[in-house]
Image: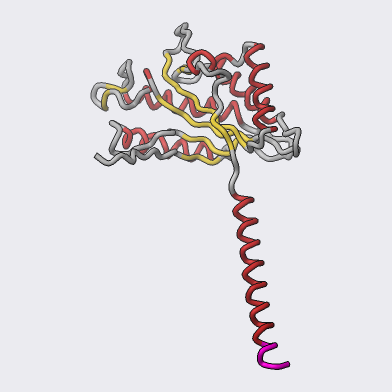
């Protein structure tokens, strides 16, 4: 074999190796990334059509089931349910977007039914299932940004021990609602649960206290249940 033939063969092997490497990496990238949507309301008027607190109402559930099927058929791999806690227990309100703090028995039942419904969905295009993520927000009486350790936290200025007890009860209710619910392929329905979905340490009052106080237990309990615990960071990129 001449020198030029050897050189051509070496170049061929080199380019072939590059092609295999790129193909391998592209395949890995495509297998890692999934597409999903935030989905917590069935209409454009979010305050009236947020569905978790209303999921026991049959026509609300029917609408959501139709929309979930459309989301799966459209190619989404998961939906993320945002839950805003902040309503006083026992309070009658038309603010359907605001869940009770701590999570009520009805809301726990609703979440369980919603999770089961998500798990029942398969794409009619390629049979892939939907998975579920859950992100938690804290407003109203659950708004830790209001107050301090001396005065208490939230709009009702709950003392720190009561505030923490309600966070823990809410965490436990969520775990109860979603535990052992599996998709048609046998995998756990819920992938990630976010304790706080807008973390900006140093930019929000009391957020360092909230995370350092509540995340360790949250981390342990969510992990033991088989899900991924997380917090979601938010960045203000404005230059001022």
> In x, y percent, where is residue 234?
39, 38
Residue pushed farthest top?
Answer: 92
Classify residue 115 as left or right of residue 200: right
Name the image quarter holding the C terminus.
Answer: top left
Residue 140 vertical position relative to residue 213 in the rendered view, above or below? above
Residue 41 vertical position relative to residue 120 in the rendered view, above or below? above
> In x, y percent, where is residue 80?
55, 32
Residue at the spot 56% in from the left edge and 30% down from the top edge: 175
Residue 12 vertical position relative to residue 73 in the rendered view, above or below? below
Residue 13 quadrant: bottom right
Residue 54 quadrant: top right
Please tell me whether the stretch drawn in magenta is mainly helix, strand or loop. Answer: helix
Q: Coloured how?
A: secondary structure
Residue range corresponding to the magenta coloring = 1-6
Residue situated in front as seen by the camera: 235 or 2 = 2
Name the image quarter holding the N terminus.
Answer: bottom right
Count the marks.
0
């Amino acid at each position: 074999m001449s020198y030029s033939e050897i050189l051509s063969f070496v170049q061929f092997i080199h380019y072939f190796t590059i092609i295999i490497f790129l193909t391998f990496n592209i395949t890995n990238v495509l297998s890692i990334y999934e597409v999903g949507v935030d989905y917590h309301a069935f209409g454009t008027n979010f305050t009236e059509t947020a569905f978790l607190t209303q999921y026991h109402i049959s026509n609300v559930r029917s609408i959501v089931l139709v929309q979930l099927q459309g989301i799966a058929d459209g190619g989404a791999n998961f939906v993320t349910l945002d839950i805003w806690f902040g309503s006083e227990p026992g309070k009658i309100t038309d603010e359907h977007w605001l869940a009770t703090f701590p999570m009520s028995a009805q809301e726990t039942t609703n979440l369980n039914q919603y999770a089961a419904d998500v798990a029942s969905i398969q794409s009619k295009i390629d049979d892939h299932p939907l998975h579920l993520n859950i992100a938690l927000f804290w407003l109203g009486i659950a708004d830790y940004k209001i107050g301090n350790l001396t005065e208490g936290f939230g709009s009702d200025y709950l003392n720190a021990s009561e505030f923490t007890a309600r966070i823990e009860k809410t965490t436990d209710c969520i775990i109860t609602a979603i535990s052992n619910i599996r998709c048609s392929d046998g995998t756990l329905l819920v992938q990630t649960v976010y304790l706080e979905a807008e973390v900006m340490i140093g930019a929000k009052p009391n957020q360092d206290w909230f995370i350092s106080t509540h995340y360790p237990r949250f981390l342990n309990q969510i992990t033991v249940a088989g899900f991924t615990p997380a917090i979601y960071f938010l960045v203000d990129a404005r230059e001022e």
